[in-house]
Image (tube, helix red, strand yellow):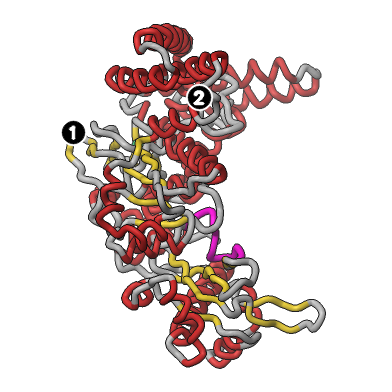
Amino acid sequence: MAFPAPFLDELAARNPIEDVVGGYVALTRRGSNLFGLCPFHNEKTPSFSVAPDKQMYYCFGCGKGGGVVNFIMEAENLSYPDAVRFLAQRAGMEVPEDDAHREDYRRRERLYALCREAARYFHAMLNSPAGGPGRAYAAQRGLSQSCITRFGLGFAPEGWNGLRDAMRARGYDEQDLLDAGLAVRSPQKNNVYDKFRNRLMFPIIDVRGNVIGFGGRVMGQGEPKYLNSPETEIFSKRRNLFALNIAKKTKRDYLILTEGYMDAITLHQYGFDCAVASLGTSLTEQHANLLGKYTRQLILTYDGDSAGQNASQRAIRLLEKTNIQVRVLRMTGAKDPDEYLHKFGAERFAKLLEGAENQVAYRLQSLQSRFDLGQDDQRVAFARAAADLVASLPGAVEREVYGARAAEAAGMSAAGLMTEVERLRRQKLRQEKRQQEKVDLAPMSRRQPKIRGMHYEDEKSAQAEEQLLAQVMREPGLFDRIDLGEEEFSAPLLGRAYAALRSCWQQGRQPGMAALEAAFSPEELSHLTAVLARWDQTVDDRAVQDCVDVIRGRWQARNVNVESSDDNMQYRKDIMQYRKYLQEKKGLGG
Ligand SMILES: [Zn+2]
């Protein structure tokens, strides 16, 4: 599934990274680089950089980095091949698809088309005589006609073959229906029948506008009450949120996250066009990242029961990592937003939103609910736990406010609780300082890759390898003079990058981001761009030779230690001599 190298080079040339990124981020020039506010993490001062000469971007804040294709993958939530197609379309280029690739792409396009057709069929059914029960249910739930149209709601009538036969007539076969999750095979009768029957249908649409699956609400008392499409090639519950395709266009500076589609739809109906719903799963890391692309502030409206509270706590912890500010909505007199809006109307809900508690208040509140404050020992335990929570807040004013609130709940003086908060704070600061000292003493440890399972085994060599890698990117002609082998690198990732760039050069291509992006994962790319950003100075031949010497010397030392058999030593000596001979011949002996 590889794209031809010359195509990728041209793609990169026709999509200058500064133009592409400039469409997403306001950039200002500072020296040879451009800077802006990072689209991938929350920040107030720009630490996101674009280097036109290297055709790469790198964020000094969150450490994300890569080339233009990788940027589109991150910004548009696309796979590598789809990001390539996206950029090809942007530049008006034809994509040379190889056969397996093209087949794969066609397959997915076919499933998208089938799901769209199915959504049309269900929608037509809702408005047909067979759709009576669906229309009655929608009316009973108070759904307006315009909302039904906007969300493309539909109805799957009773019976086993309605959708199957209609889609067959449009040229789709049973395998298509199974792959799209719209049909089920009966093992006994070995036939294929409709998965959704006698249900109000909610099409699930991704952020790019493709119908990827469905949710169905049963009419009457059947089980399960809500049925979702299974995971398919095009539908993943963990990666998609209901109504985000609409909510992403909202003018409001926050999104509302609900537990069910009915809540989200009702919110839209009442003018809150910023509501999304998770699809019958708890919030995932992928959801959190996806939300982070569209908002800086999220309001949670989970149910008030203990399951809902646990879900809120879990979501808050996940969202904290993305720097989304979280607030939690507390409703009284209704169990969910759907019920609340129908009972009390939009204006009161808007008031509720204004008062939505921020996550600190919420956490304090749920902490409190775990203790019986009528008992002395429980009060003490609560005060301790609350002091710990308050001590973790960065702002002094915040600590003051929530400290006082916690003290009141614990029935003690604010001053008393704050003494404990300050003690914990000093303790935390001391710990942080010790951590920082450790880092300062061993500066290389800061450069350790953040990729799980990857570690620089030999930091001295790794430093030379990093420097050399950055240098050959700038001056690929060096490849003709350096005879280092990939195996001599102590860090496999750096060795692979070096080898990839060298093979590029040997094929007469410009070694650059386009080659790296095709061969490395986003995490690996982030580390490689960090390396390139770090070693930004051009160095002279002397320094390059020093790097080569360090890398080779460390490699030899490692191998002498590991392998001591005579044969091996002789063999290595021979190689050394041969390398030395080559080196002298090429005139980079120093
Ligand atoms: Zn960032």
Magenta stretch?
230-240
Residue topped by disc 2: 448
- The residue at the point 36 percent across, 77 percent down is 149
Q: Nearer the viewer, residue 41 or 132?
A: 132
Q: Tag 1's secondary structure? A: strand
Q: Mark 2: which amino acid?
A: Gln
* Picture quadrant of residue 371: top right
Residue located at (32% from left, 47% from top): 295
10 Å neighbourhood of mark 2: few (<14), some, or many (≥20)?
some
Residue 471 in picture, x, y percent from top left = 39, 30
Q: CA distance from mark 1 to mark 2?
A: 28 Å
**Quadrant in the picture for the C terminus:** top left
Most common SS among magenta residues: loop
**Vertical position of residue 528 compared to residue 80: above or below:** above
Q: Is residue 505 above or below residue 323?
A: below
Q: Which mark is residue 30?
A: 1
Measured as percent of width and height from the top left, residue 408 is found at 38, 19
Total label count? 2
Q: Amino acid at mark 1?
A: Arg
Which of the 4 image quarters holds residue 419? top left
Q: Residue furthest front?
A: 374
Q: Residue at x 44, y 31 (%)?
A: 365
Residue 584 seen anywhere in this rendered image of the structure: no
Q: Is residue 148 magenta?
A: no
Residue 238 belongs to magenta span: yes
Secondary-structure class at tag 2: loop
Q: Could you tell me residue 474's position as x and y percent?
A: 35, 35
Image quarter hosting the N terminus = bottom right
Residue 227 left/right relative to 49:
right
